[in-house]
């Protein structure tokens, strides 16, 4: 899985950070220490960690991921990463 999206709410820039969806690589999610949850009202699961995005980005860089783009969408910050 060469592409990965991570995100956080602006008011929660210290965490938690969303790091994957229900189809994400389980080995990568384990490396990040991510837990799967389903929020009330959602019909899907997502993986999250209680760490700040900066900490998650540092971990992903060690695995060869590089930030391709970053944007703000409403009250959400989103990073797109790619690994060769």
Image (spheres, rainbow, N blue to C red):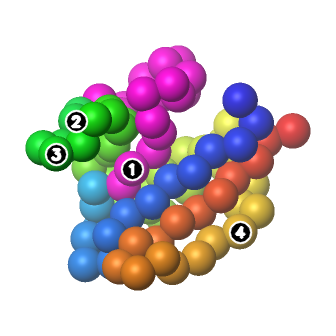
Mark 3 or mark 1, which is nearer the start of the sequence?
Answer: 1
Query: What SS does tag 2 mark?
Result: loop
Which residue in the structure is indicated by mark 4? 69
Q: Position of residue 78 (x, y in %)?
A: 52, 66
* Mark 3 neighbour class, 10 Å CA radius: few under 14, some 14 to 19, many 20 or more: few
Q: Position of residue 68 (x, y in %)?
A: 76, 62
In the shown orientation, is residue 43 left or right of residue 41?
right
| Residue in the picture at 63% in, 72% down | 70
Spot the residue most to the top. 27
| Magenta-highlighted residues | 17-36
In the shown orientation, is residue 44 left or right of residue 40?
right
Gap in angstroms between the C-alphas marked 1 and 3: 17 Å
Gap in angstroms between the C-alphas marked 2 and 1: 12 Å
Closer to the camera: disc 2 or disc 1?
Answer: 2
Give the quadrant of the C terminus.
top right
| Residue in the picture at 53% in, 18% down | 27
Gap in angstroms between the C-alphas marked 2 and 3: 8 Å
Query: What SS does tag 1 mark?
Result: strand
Say which of 20 and 41 sits in front.
41
Which residue in the structure is indicated by mark 2? 38
In the shown orientation, is residue 51 left or right of residue 26?
left
| Looking at the image, residue 62 lies above or below residue 30 | below
Which residue in the structure is indicated by mark 1? 18
């Amino acid at each position: 899985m060469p592409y990965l999206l991570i995100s956080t709410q602006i008011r929660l820039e210290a965490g938690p950070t969303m790091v994957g969806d229900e189809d994400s690589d389980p080995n990568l999610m384990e490396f990040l220490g991510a837990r799967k949850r389903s929020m009330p009202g959602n019909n899907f699961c997502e993986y999250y960690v209680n760490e700040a995005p900066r900490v998650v980005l540092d971990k992903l860089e060690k695995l060869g991921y590089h930030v391709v783009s970053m944007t703000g969408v409403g009250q959400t910050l989103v990073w797109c990463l790619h690994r060769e």
